[in-house]
């Protein structure tokens, strides 16, 4: 009784072995599985997706610039992954709940992040900004893979509440090696939890190519856990939308978890501290530049005569305004008072910490007296 | 008042919490159909159903991680870790998520998890089944740590832990599971003393003995033995290991001037070190002798047949009492420490 | 690009969906995948396998008895799993290295455990007994799943040494939920390490049926990690031998890791502390009793006229002798000296622990003086 | 003697270990092609090949667990954990396997692992990138724990750690990676002082300041400032946190009678508690004042913009020096502790 995978395990690096609706040149292609999920997508919706992606790209560029100017401590660019993030996030309902990683700027944007929300944590003012009640999105997770279990638990809660909601979690190709991500699939499958796993396979985990994590396509992992999966072109926003609609519907309709592998590319460095020239070739970067998700959607819109300069300049204007707001939120940030380091460690009073706070307050007081008299 | 074992009292605590608050969920390995390997959750699945009492897959990180997700959704998960030695796979989720999410989100996300851990040794168990990992959690900001020693506390403090909006790591000494005591099942949460307070388990004049968990019983036994020799021990059951109730501790130490602290865990960077240091900070002028730690050795938990040479017993406590009283003791303490008089002492390397 | 599993995911509980060579009634059946791996197995070898299983069953019963008599602290019976353990372990070479769990008495037996080796840890005299150099077997692991990573690391070492050896790891169905087991598959696949994973799916993890861990056959997990797998009848010792020969050959010949799911049954309690009547039916136990691995092999031998009473009584005699030796080793056990608790914490001198040891030695001395004078 | 940064010195230490012993293997995330996110392993892959220098999948438990397997096979793995905050997924393998296997097997299986951890804060990093988890490992019997503070020690002690037959958790303060110092690359291991010894970093008479890691530098800065006010601080770099070299520590304390211990980690059950307790045990009669801890608060590591209010600086050390000298200080210590005079003090619960 041999078990094999169907389609049989191809090398993980065959990035064209994906479900796709729009080719790199912007022409539309049929896909038996995806077509029915995007039947209603008209030009207006496509333009909406383009606008989202363009804004996210602009905000991302602003983040990089602000970091270069010393205004942010770090930035993890999402350039190249806009289609994955926007396509999947736009398939959700507001009441669904999202558990993202640190690179999901586009997801946060769709979920309603405000300008200050996207920079204050990178600036080191606070650890996180998202109001999870309003955005129904957890703070971006830094511990690789940890959030996937949170999503499954949340989905188990949805089941218990009998609600018509799903949980969604985003993580990278590197994350698939972590025990937590695998345990998340075990729990999700065991309880039939309404959760969608979205793996943004951007080909790299810092300097390690995806083949260090998996020699075979990541989407192939899920079926063994009893979780149906789809491997989708992560630079094709329409395919991402369709695939996520399939996955969300699967989870929402009580059929349990679903898994997407979005095959995309991290066009920038891992973070602003990283130097990708140490580990990947310019040739590879160029190859992926030709699969740029924004250019692809622009080409589709042009083919379909749904692109015009008014639209382009309206989007550019909106993007610049958003970026300016991000810049303002950064430059206008006011650091919290020293004693706030003691706030919110506990939700209820804590004698030991209260004493430490008092001592540190006295210390700061004494110190400023001293300053004053010097 | 009803006589019952600590195990039964804990079961009542869970049942009461499940009844009082329908957001409470109990989860863990074998806690449903089996009622847990210690039968603490016996009957809960039948009574509350699989929506509230969840037999989970065998993965501790998964258990705690999904409990975090349930807390995001407004539930109050009570997690059972089957044995002390199996909490480590969940350590990352506990330290980086459970302990930090409230802080990370400036108080927006609450983590009212209770992590129950059948705990510590003295029961002749196999490797990994007798561990005392409490110091790891005491050292982790954002967690509260409780260790109970008698049925009434087990019942009430478990309810308090579950009702608390902060995450609580709740240690249940296995070696006392079958010990009986009076329990008043009708106490209102509102009437109970706060969860953070220590308990003076026995009044005494000469030496303050600080203990928690099963060592409280050992300390009380030592107090009885000491009394026969005319020495009066005050025994304080810390109960809350984070925070420690230093009001109660310091008041006692200022009276006795002598301190012995005992626990099963190894001493090195253990809870005893924390307690001694804090006592010294608060009571230095009152101390007649250096506080003594009577702890497990700094060794992995030994094989069962040798555990009596690791878990501190009554005699080791009494020996330390002798030391703090300046009386001859078998263990000379550090005065005879050969290391200190070694030729290398105080050598400047560079 | 949907990924599905082939054979498509059946419920995990279909215990007949396995590779098999001997039916429950002892008749031989052909299996396209396994036959070639057992061509050389003659009656003598079959009788050897029977003898191993019978001895292990007898030792296991002795362990249970000794525990009941208070001579052992605990015992984890392997009754019902003898075919899995003997069949797979007999497929190995002496120089291979095995990382077992606590229930693999039969594996330890094949690897050369002596009578004292199988009881002293359960008695609480020592934490472990196996001499890993002689037995090329690690101490049985209690932390569920942890040993699987050790096996992979060991196999990576074999690769580095260019040796013609493999590593093997045993674990339960429950263990498959642990992050470590999944990470082990990731590392094994990534490095193409010569390691064989043997999952003894005995249907239960203490009180939890295998369906809590996985709704689909566990063998289906491995292919998603790029690890070929086979689901084998774990009560058919011939099939287990054949399957392990396939897997070992796969690993040894440089084709990377392989995975076996042996579908078997824990006929006894989880340990002597457990009470299975709380969670499973007598009917289920009876159903599996009819699939007893020893009876099956006996029936095969009878069908093939390779069974005779001389053989049976020789085996019984050998088993009794082994059991007696186990009993002697238990009753004759001498506990280690108190101060040995300090031994071997470190391999090199440790000033802090040396001081503790000295103090405790003085304490014990003083204490015995006191005893003497009382 | 060559001037080089601590980061460069560590790289030399690894290169030397790889050269001297072909059973040494270096493994971790991004340590190969990239040379590690801090470039400590830069060039090693090219020099020693992928058989010796292994870029691993992204899973810390997997890294440490496979290193255990390599040790079984006779290798000496040197594992890099990318940042302090990412060691927790490996905690189970470290605590239950790495620390205990030698004991479990009565010394048959050796675990000569070195676990390198870029460590601690003060570098303006994101959450989880500035943690000080050393107390967890100090509390774990079976491990040795090293924390370096200067390039020469970094070079030599890393070599010693790798050569040691016990597992060593090796902490490298990120905030000193770029600090330069003289390094003698030619020292033989046989000629080096044992790895467990502390180092008197500066001689002084009035107060003993105990520090490790980056805090050593802060303590030395404090000593310079104190000197201007006529106070002479002796600064001891503990270097080895398990075991601690109490010969050197006690010799100093017996001379000065006053102690300040400083670290970035929270104080509760931290290394400072252990050190204070051990000093009190050994030097009680010599102490003129209660030892002071100057540590991070018992909070999760705060956002970067506020870290200066967490990591103890020169001024907080000097304030504590004032306290142990009985001089007025800004932080009143526990004398003014309102808790102690609360009406509940010493309350007998039962
Ligand atoms: C538990 C843990 N280990 C290591 C890291 C350090 N780290 C941060 S991002 C990263 C690579 C992640 O790769 P991937 O999952 O593919 O996501 P990507 O960055 O490509 O979006 C690593 C190793 C971490 N944050 N958490
Ligand atoms: C990390 C860890 N968690 C929990 C346990 C407690 N425990 C011991 S055996 C067991 C069930 C194991 O089931 P399985 O893997 O199927 O192996 P089996 O006992 O059936 O052979 C559990 C939960 C443990 N030993 N280690
Ligand atoms: Mg990636
Ligand atoms: Mg099982």
Image (cartoon, coloured by chain):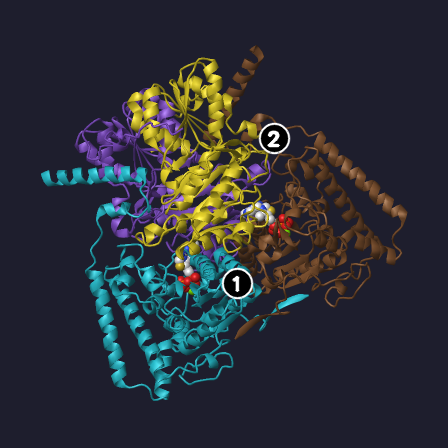
Chain colours: A brown, B purple, C cyan, D yellow
B39 over B214 or under it: above or below: below
x and y, in percent, of residue B231 in the image: 20, 29
Q: Quadrant of residue D37?
A: top right
| Location of mark 2 (residue) | D305
Q: From the Cβ of disc 1, is ligand 1 less than 8 Å away?
A: no
The quarter of the image holding the N terminus of chain B is: top left
Q: Nearer the viewer, mark 2 or mark 1?
A: 1
x and y, in percent, of residue D112 in the image: 40, 49
x and y, in percent, of residue B51 in the image: 53, 56
Residue at x 33% of width, y 60% of height: C133
Where disc 2 sits, the SS reads: helix
Q: Which mark is residue D22?
A: none
Tell whether B253 sits left or right of C236: left
Residue at x 46% of width, y 17% of height: D226
Where disc 1 sits, the SS reads: loop
Label 2 marks which chain's residue?
D
Q: From the viewer's side, name the closer residue of A40 and C30.
A: C30
Label 1 marks which chain's residue?
C
Tell whether B334 sits left or right of C251: left
Tell whether D116 sits left or right of B327: right
- Residue B214 in sight from this viewpoint: yes
Tell whether C290 sits left or right of A293: left
Q: Residues within 10 Å of mark 2 (few under 14, many from 20)?
A: some
| Location of mark 1 (residue) | C192
Q: Quadrant of residue B281?
A: top left
Q: From the Cβ of disc 2, is ligand 1 less than 8 Å away?
A: no
């Amino acid at each position: 009784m041999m078990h094999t995978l169907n389609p049989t395990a191809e090398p993980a690096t065959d990035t064209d072995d994906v479900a796709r609706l729009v080719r790199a040149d912007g022409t539309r292609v049929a896909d038996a599985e995806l077509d029915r999920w995007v039947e209603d997508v008209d030009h207006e919706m496509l333009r909406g997706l383009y606008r989202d992606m363009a804004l996210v790209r602009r905000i991302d560029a602003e983040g990089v610039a602000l970091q270069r100017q010393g205004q942010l401590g770090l930035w993890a660019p999402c350039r190249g992954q806009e289609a994955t993030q926007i396509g999947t996030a736009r398939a959700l309902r507001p009441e669904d709940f999202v558990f993202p990683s640190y690179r999901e700027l586009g997801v946060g944007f769709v979920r309603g992040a405000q300008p200050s929300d996207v920079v204050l944590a990178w600036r080191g003012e606070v650890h996180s900004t998202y109001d999870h009640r309003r955005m129904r999105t957890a703070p971006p997770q830094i511990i690789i893979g940890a959030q996937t279990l949170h999503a499954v638990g949340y989905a188990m809660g949805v089941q218990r509440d009998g609600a018509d909601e799903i949980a969604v979690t985003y993580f990278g190709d590197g994350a698939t090696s972590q025990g937590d991500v695998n345990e998340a699939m075990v729990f999700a499958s065991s309880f039939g939890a309404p959760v969608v796993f979205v793996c943004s396979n951007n080909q790299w985990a810092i300097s390690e190519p995806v083949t260090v994590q998996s020699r075979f396509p990541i989407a192939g992992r899920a079926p063994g856990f009893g979780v149906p999966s789809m491997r989708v072109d992560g630079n094709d926003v329409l395919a991402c939308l369709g695939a996520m609609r399939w996955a969300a519907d699967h989870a929402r309709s009580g059929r349990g978890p679903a898994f997407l592998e979005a095959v995309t590319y991290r066009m920038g460095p891992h973070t602003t501290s990283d130097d990708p020239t140490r580990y990947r070739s310019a040739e590879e970067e160029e190859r992926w530049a030709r699969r740029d998700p924004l250019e692809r959607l622009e080409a589709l819109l042009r083919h379909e005569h749904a692109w015009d300069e008014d639209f382009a300049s309206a989007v550019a204007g909106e993007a610049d305004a958003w970026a300016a707001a991000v810049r303002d939120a950064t430059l206008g940030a006011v650091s919290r008072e020293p004693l706030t380091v003691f706030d919110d460690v506990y939700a209820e009073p804590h004698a030991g910490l209260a004493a430490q706070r008092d001592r540190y307050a006295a210390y700061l007081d004494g110190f400023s007296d001293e300053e004053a008299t010097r | 008042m009803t006589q019952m074992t600590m195990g039964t009292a804990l079961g009542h605590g869970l049942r009461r919490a499940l009844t009082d608050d329908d957001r409470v969920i109990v989860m863990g390995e074998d806690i449903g159909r089996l009622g847990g390997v210690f039968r603490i959750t016996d009957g809960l699945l039948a009574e509350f159903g699989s929506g509230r009492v969840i037999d989970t897959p065998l993965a501790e990180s998964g258990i705690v991680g999904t409990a975090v997700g349930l807390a995001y959704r407004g539930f109050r998960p009570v997690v059972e870790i089957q044995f002390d030695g199996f909490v480590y796979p969940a350590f990352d989720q506990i330290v980086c998520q459970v302990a930090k999410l409230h802080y990370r989100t400036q108080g927006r996300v609450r983590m009212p998890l209770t992590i129950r851990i059948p705990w510590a040794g003295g029961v002749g168990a196999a490797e990994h089944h007798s561990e005392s990992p409490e110091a790891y959690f005491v050292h982790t900001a954002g967690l509260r740590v409780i260790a109970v020693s008698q049925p009434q506390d087990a019942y009430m403090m478990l309810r308090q832990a579950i009702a608390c909006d902060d995450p609580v790591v709740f240690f249940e000494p296995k070696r006392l599971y079958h010990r009986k005591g009076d329990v008043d099942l009708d106490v209102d949460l509102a009437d109970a003393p706060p969860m953070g307070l220590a308990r003076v388990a026995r009044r005494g004049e000469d030496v303050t003995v600080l203990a928690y968990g099963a060592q409280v019983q050992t300390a009380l036994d030592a107090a009885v033995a000491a009394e026969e020799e005319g020495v009066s021990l005050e025994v304080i059951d810390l109960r809350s290991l984070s925070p420690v109730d230093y009001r109660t501790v310091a008041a006692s130490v200022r009276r006795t001037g002598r301190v012995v602290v005992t626990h099963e865990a190894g001493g090195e960077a253990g809870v005893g070190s924390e307690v001694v240091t804090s006592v010294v900070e608060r009571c230095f002028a009152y101390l007649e002798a250096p506080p003594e730690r009577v702890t497990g050795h700094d060794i992995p938990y030994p094989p069962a047949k040798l555990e009596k040479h690791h878990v501190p017993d009554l005699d080791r406590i009494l020996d330390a009492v002798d030391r703090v009283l300046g009386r001859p003791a078998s263990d000379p303490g550090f005065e005879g420490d050969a290391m200190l008089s070694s030729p290398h002492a105080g050598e400047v390397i560079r």
